[in-house]
Amino acid sequence: YIDGVDRSVVHNIVIAGGATVSYVTGGTDVGDEACTKDLCLVTTNNSTINRDIYAYFGVGDAAPLAILNQTTASEFGPAILHP
């Protein structure tokens, strides 16, 4: 779930045991999170039409990997698919 006044922290709750893993994105207005214990995909600029998708690897990743940067279309709802 997304937390913070500026929507800047993503929390992943592990159902087995209830442990919480927090990804501090360093950005604001993030949303549409899809996370595992090692990876979190989020959209930025969540309240605007031009969203970007970033991957955060591990807790406290300060240098996310840009997966998709949009300038004209609205992309959101990233998903992590398991085989």
Image (cartoon, rainbow, N blue to C red):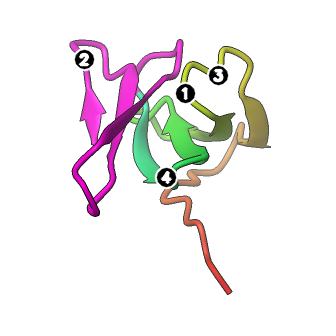
Residue 80, x across and y down, in percent: 59, 66
Which residue corresponds to the image point at 74% horizontal and 18% vertical from the top-left? Answer: 63
Observer-nearest residue: 82 or 16?
Answer: 16
Of the residues shown, which amino acid type is indicated by label 4? Cys
Q: Is disc 3 placed on a helix, strand or loop?
A: loop
User: For mark 3, does the 10 Å Cα neighbourhood hold few (<14), some (14 to 19), or many (20 or more) residues?
Assistant: some
Which residue is label 1 attached to? 59
Magenta span includes 24: yes
Asked if marks 1 and 3 touch (Cβ < 8 Å), the reply is: yes
* Numbered tag placed on residue 4 in the rendering: 2
Looking at the rendered structure, the secondary structure element under dot 2 is loop
Query: Quick check: 54 left or right of 35?
Result: right
Cα distance between the residues tagged 4 and 2: 18 Å
Q: Nearer the viewer, mark 4 or mark 1?
A: 1
Q: Residue at x 58, y 54 (%)?
A: 75
Say whether disc 2 or disc 3 marks the residue closer to the N-terminus.
Answer: 2
Q: Residue at x 30, y 14 (%)?
A: 6
Chain part drawn in magenta? 1-29
Residue 18 located left or right of residue 41 = left
- Does residue 75 lie above or below 31 as drawn? below
**Amino acid at dot 2:** Gly
Picture disc at residue 61: 3
Vertical arrangement, residue 9 with respect to residue 19, above or below: above
The residue singled out by tag 4 in the image is: 35
